[in-house]
Structures are given as structure tokens and as C-alpha cells.
Image (tube, rainbow, N blue to C red):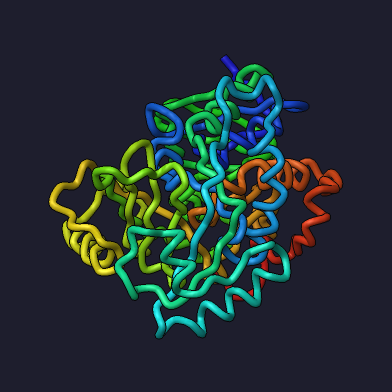
Amino acid sequence: MTSPIHDFAVIGAGIAGASVAAELSKTASVILLEMEPQPGYHTTSRSAAILAPGYGVAPVRALVGASVPFLLHPPADFSRSPLTTGPRPILTISRKDQLEVLDRLHAELSRESNVSRLDASEVHRKAPLLRPGYAAGGLLDPQGHDLDVHALHSGYLTMFTTNGGRLETGARVASLKQTDGVWEIGTSGGSWKAATVVNAAGAWAEQIGRLAGAEVIGLVAKRRTALTIGVPEGLQTDRLPFVVDVQEQFYLKPDAGQLLISPANEDPMPPCDVQPEDLDVAICVDRIERAFDLTISRIASKWAGLRSFVADGCPVIGYSEQSPRFFWLAGQGGNGIQTAPAAARLAASLVLRHDIPADIREQELNIRSLSPARPGIG
């Protein structure tokens, strides 16, 4: 039996792949290939689940800005539950020796948001768990929210299948070959054909690119560790902010009746089913206890996830210049959840060679800054 030729094959069913497949499936036939038994097993399911509009490099912030309306007010039929709860203000804190870094960040963010500069006493009022005298200043972004990652991911997968898209799990891509303008995709679960391949394979995206003969983008997977611990007795967490060190040496976030903490590590490693390492856990506990009036005697849970970066920290979104009809959607660097709505619409527009949506253009996003052929990332 001859395999049908789909308009698009999207590789990777995490949030990036699921969202772009849903957008493309509105007008085209799409097959979504996932190597794991269920979508979103790796980075998507291990997110810090925060909407932080002031976080990341400028192109990331532009994509987040264009995603915020969808995340706060999704279509009525997209999800049975809200995608966000909050607000959850983002409090970036600085020790005395980090104040110059804080001032530079304030100057950059104040041009595009209503982030406010706080002195030491204001920081400690906002974050009463901080040890007295630890923070010398801070920035407060009131636009943060908690994100329901499962609801967002499930919403896109439901949209995709409702539109007639086909999801294949257990389909690890082993070969990519283009014959007469058609991609032949060999996987552990069968062979498929598509006119265009969209590479949304997360930490494995560079490997997929090599199979396709595409350019090297220098993608590096980096391990990040997170733990949950109990909340001190009597502490009300509803109004507590997400607290992050200005040089991202740690963060703390109220999460489902617990505290989610991380050393915000970025340890390069090969793509794999990453697990937390004892040293990362110990570093996390040390950094959190130094900054906060907490004694961590019990860890409720711990995990690790991979966040994929290229050299300049910007996502890679665009057609390959070396491999025809091969499209990159990679390098989200830990921002894949909060950028998904805009990144998916942008990617779908570029894949289909349509005009970029007006609301994304209004964010003053430089599309060339996302190109896989841009200088300095290969």
C-alpha cells in the first residue's frame, strides 16, 4: 500500500510541534511524529510554568508580547480550563554586588514595559521569605502569571486532531530522504511521506537537521534542575511573586501549595531523558538557603529538563538555505511555552509563505534575527 503524501510532517509533538501542527492543519494535511509514547514527555512537561513578559532576549520578548492575548484570553473552545492564573508578579532581585547588572536590565526593559525599580525595603516587603539584608534592589514586573502547561499543550493537540491531523507516537525519526520533491521519513514506527518537513524536535533538532542535510545551527541542549519543597507553616503563597536572581543563579515560585525552586543551571549535555544530578540538587539547596529564610530538610520532588539554545539565545524559525522544504522551529531556550501561540502562527505563516500576522509585526520583531542562516550561530 502506497503511503499518502502529507503536505507537512512536523517532527516533535512538544509544545512547539503541537502548536505549529495545529496552525498548519487548519488548511493542510499534517502528520505529527513523536518519538516517545506520549507527546510532551521531555521539556514541555518539565517547565517552570510561568508567563514572564520581561524575560529573555528582545526577539523572545516580542514573541511573548504577541502571545499574551491568547494566553490570557484563549478562544472559548480551546480549553476547558483557563490557561493562566494570577497575576503572579515577577520579582528580579539583586545583591549589592549585582546592582550594575540590575540597572542595565532596568534600562533595557523600561523601554517596552511598565517594570518598576524597587529599593531594598520594597523588595523585602514583596518577598518576605528573603533573608534580611540579602537583596539591595529589584525590578517588579506586575504582568506575570502562572501557566497551565498541560491545558495549553492539550488544547493544541485537540485542535490538531479536530482539524484532521494525524499523530503518530513511538515514531523516532531515523532517516530523511528527499526524492522528486517529496520527503521520505523513516521512523521506528513506520515510513511517511510529506512535501515539507518542520523540525520541532527540541533538544534533538540538530540531529534531525543533520539527517536532512541542513545547515548546522550550533544547538546545545542544557540541563536545568528543579525541586519542590514544602511551604513554611502560616505562609500565604497566593500573592507571593516569582523571585529570580538578576543573573539567574536561582529562582523560587509558589506552585500548587508548594515552593518550586531551581539553581537555574544550564549544563550542556547530549540530548537524552535527562535526570537530576545530586550536585545540582545540593547547589540548589545552598543557593536558596543563602537567599531565603528557609531550612530545607525534605525535598518533595525533583526533576530535570533540557533547554535548547543557539549562541545568541534567539529561537531558530525559518526555512533551511541548504535543504529545500525543510523548516526549522528550534532553539526556544526555555521559552517555548510562553512564546508558543505567536511562534506557531509566525512559523505557519513563514512555512506557507503568507504575510506575517499584523499583531506580531507590531511587536517590532526582526525576522532576520530568527533565520537559521543568520551569522554567528552555526
Q: How many marks?
A: 0
Q: Give the side of residue 11 with respect to residue 256, left or right.
A: right
| Res 77 quadrant in image | top right
Residue 163 location, x and y as percent? 68, 19
Residue 180 location, x and y as percent? 70, 39
- Of 137 and 308, the residue lying toward us: 137
Query: Which residue is pictured at 60% across the width and 29% down the height?
Result: 156
Residue 241 location, x and y as percent? 46, 53
Work out which quarter of the rendered image holds the N terminus and state it.
Answer: top right
- Of 126 and 46, the residue lying toward us: 126
Residue 283's place in the image compared with 342, above or below, is: below
Q: Say if residue 269 shows up in the picture.
A: no
Residue 360's place in the image compared with 91, above or below, is: above
Residue 273's place in the image compared with 323, above or below, is: above
- Of 131 and 179, the residue lying toward us: 131
Residue 340 location, x and y as percent? 61, 43
Q: Give the side of residue 273 with respect to residue 342, left or right.
A: left
Query: Which residue is pictured at 54% across the width and 37% down the height?
Result: 85
Work out which quarter of the rendered image holds the C terminus and state it.
Answer: bottom right
| Res 341 quadrant in image | top right
| Res 243 quadrant in image | bottom left
Q: Say if residue 370 shows up in the picture.
A: yes
Residue farthest left in this picture: 297
Residue 336's place in the image compared with 161, above or below, is: below
Query: Which residue is pictured at 64% across the width and 38% down the height?
Result: 71
